[in-house]
Image: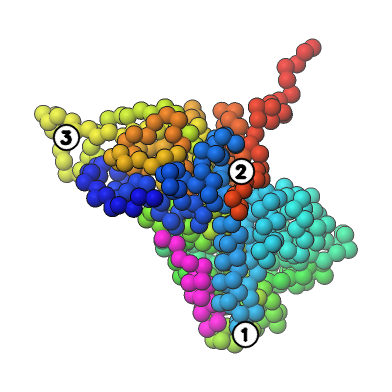
């Protein structure tokens, strides 16, 4: 690859958001956003494990989710190893549950098991995938704030290692179902520690206003002033059909700093110590959830798992010493941080359109009707997918990045917006990115960091077929989820009545 440094003399667009830097070279990959085996090859084309994207297009079509199996496995292992190392002297290691909701199919579930991780599910459907992959029940967890009786029964049939109970009502239900089967349900209680992560910072509140979990705030809902969390512990230990393993919390997603996790860990350990003092109950496990952040754009800088693991371990170690309790076995539930960076979405460029946009108004500037309007170009680059394969920009205002994948280009950067083909003006894939001026119909674009919550949230809006997922490893490809066909789209349509 040509590594000559090009000094960029181009001007940043006034329409660009403040965080978006004009890249020195549009051909260079910002490595934290990409799987480890993605690079630009000698022809200037994006390649994964040596396979150029043009070959992927020929074989599988676009849009396409392209997942590096090697990268997925190494991130899974990195979490397991980093947390095992950091917690070895505290509780002998950590159980890492991959959060299946971020992306799940049986191939991925089997990689998770191969790498020594367990699997978190949150529905009967996800349990079905786990069963198809042959994951052992004890290596599964079941989450959810509204589990059906059928899901609870299925979990008990499969002998899942833990059902994470979300409310007092559900605790009673699980106890009853397990008792009717003359069985025992292994249960964790999901608590809301009042620590909420907002990406770069976290907030701490006593009361949580959300559907998940049992509140740790002692309040008036109980006559004795007990928190819902404490009530649940007392209740759980009174049921013969419940084996209470411990408590759980999940403080949010796309978190970069360890502070929020550490504060939540400290609060939960306080709680375990209080339960031990008051009821002589020793709960052996503590799950600190997922939420580890990844790089979606060049401004995101996630910390290596080891750094976060060590910061969390330091808090658990000192807190347990302070409280004089034995450290519980720790578990965590990363999803996005394992699968997110392993995958990029490959799209084909279609219609290009440049619009002129008024200068963003500077506050204090009075709109003087006498001066000519200054406008700036914004180019809309339409691709053959959109909000049906990536709903996150619409749902969460999420930022992504994109590069020209089918070739290198020395053309000038142009502020661009990558949009989909849906009948919705909010159908944006990448809100703001500099792409080479010469991007043309038929070029391929790649959007990195789409492994988590993209395919998982995909839809058939406008009767678009959902893309397939191809896994790449050791220079070969394997379709792990095939793309939908028109026949799939019509499969459930019961047809025109012919009476
Ligand atoms: C979503 C979720 C996770 C995974 O979150 P990531 O941000 O993907 O790591 C883990 N645990 C629970 C309970 C969740 O709801």
Which quadrant of the figure has residue 397? top left
* Magenta-span inclusion, residue 163: no
Is residue 456 visible from the viewing direction of this image?
A: yes
In the depicted view, which residue is nearer to us: 97 or 209? 97
Precedes in sequence: disc 2 or disc 3: 3
- For marks 2 and 3, give the CA distance: 51 Å
Tag 3's secondary structure?
A: loop
- Relative placement, left or right, of 406 versus 143 is left
Is 424 placed above or below 328 here?
Answer: above
Disc 2 under 8 Å from ligand 1? The reply is: no
- For marks 3 and 1, give the CA distance: 66 Å
Tag 2's secondary structure?
A: strand
Is 181 placed above or below 499 here?
Answer: below
Q: Residue at x 55, y 82 (%)?
A: 317
Q: Residue at x 24, y 48 (%)?
A: 8
Residue neighbourhood size for the residue with mark 3, other residues' Cα within 10 Å, grouped as few (<14), some (14–19), many (≥20): few
User: Hey, which residue is sitting farthest left in the picture?
Assistant: 370
Q: Residue at x 40, y 54 (%)?
A: 30
Give the magenta-colored segment's residue range.
Answer: 301-318
- In terms of secondary structure, what is the magenta stretch mainly? helix
Which quadrant of the figure has residue 364? top left
Q: In this figure, which residue is indicated by the disc labeled 1?
A: 325
Q: In this figure, which residue is indicated by the disc labeled 3?
A: 367
Front tag of 2 and 3? 2
Q: In this figure, which residue is indicated by the disc labeled 2?
A: 469
Precedes in sequence: disc 3 or disc 1: 1
């Amino acid at each position: 690859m040509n590594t000559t440094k090009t000094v960029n003399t181009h001007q940043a667009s006034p329409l660009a958001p403040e965080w978006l830097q004009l890249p020195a070279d549009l051909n260079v990959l910002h490595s934290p956003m990409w799987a480890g085996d993605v690079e630009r090859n000698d022809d200037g084309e994006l390649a994964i494990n040596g396979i150029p994207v043009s070959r992927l297009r020929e074989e599988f079509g676009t849009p396409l989710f392209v997942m590096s199996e090697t990268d997925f496995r190494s991130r899974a292992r990195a979490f397991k190893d980093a947390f095992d190392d950091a917690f070895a002297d505290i509780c002998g290691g950590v159980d890492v549950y991959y959060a299946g909701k971020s992306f799940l199919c049986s191939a991925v579930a089997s990689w998770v098991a191969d790498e020594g991780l367990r699997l978190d599910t949150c529905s009967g459907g996800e349990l079905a995938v786990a069963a198809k992959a042959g994951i052992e029940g004890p290596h599964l967890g079941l989450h959810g704030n509204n589990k059906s009786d059928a899901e609870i029964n299925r979990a008990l049939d499969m002998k899942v290692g833990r059902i994470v109970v979300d409310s007092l009502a559900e605790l009673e239900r699980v106890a009853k179902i397990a008792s009717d089967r003359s069985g025992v349900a292994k249960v964790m209680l999901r608590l809301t520690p009042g620590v909420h992560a907002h990406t770069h910072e976290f907030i701490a509140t006593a009361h949580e206003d959300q559907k998940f979990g049992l509140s740790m705030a002692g309040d008036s809902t109980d006559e004795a002033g007990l928190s819902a969390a404490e009530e649940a512990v007392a209740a759980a230990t009174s049921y013969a059909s419940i084996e209470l393993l411990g408590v759980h919390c999940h403080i949010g997603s796309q978190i970069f700093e360890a502070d929020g996790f550490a504060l939540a860990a400290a609060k939960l350990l306080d709680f375990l110590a209080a339960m031990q003092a008051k009821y002589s109950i020793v709960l052996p496990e503590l799950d600190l959830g997922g939420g580890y952040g990844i790089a979606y754009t060049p401004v995101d800088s996630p910390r290596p798992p080891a750094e976060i693991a060590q910061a969390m371990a330091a808090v658990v170690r000192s807190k347990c010493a302070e409280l004089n309790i034995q450290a519980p076995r720790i578990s965590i539930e990363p999803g996005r941080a394992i699968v997110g960076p392993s995958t990029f979405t490959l799209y084909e460029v279609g219609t290009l359109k440049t619009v002129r946009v008024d200068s963003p108004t500077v506050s204090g500037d009075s709109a003087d009707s006498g001066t000519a309007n200054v406008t700036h170009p914004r180019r809309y680059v339409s691709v053959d997918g959109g909000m049906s394969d990536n709903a996150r920009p619409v749902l969460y205002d999420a930022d992504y990045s994109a590069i020209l994948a089918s070739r290198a280009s020395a053309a000038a950067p142009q502020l661009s917006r990558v949009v989909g083909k849906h009948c919705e003006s909010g159908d944006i894939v990448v809100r703001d990115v500099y792409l080479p001026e010469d991007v043309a119909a038929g070029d391929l674009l790649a959007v990195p960091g789409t492994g988590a919550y993209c395919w998982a949230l995909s839809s058939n809006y406008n009767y678009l077929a959902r893309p397939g997922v191809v896994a790449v490893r050791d220079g070969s490809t394997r379709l792990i989820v095939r793309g939908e066909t028109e026949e799939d789209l019509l499969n459930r349509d019961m047809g025109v009545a012919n009476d």
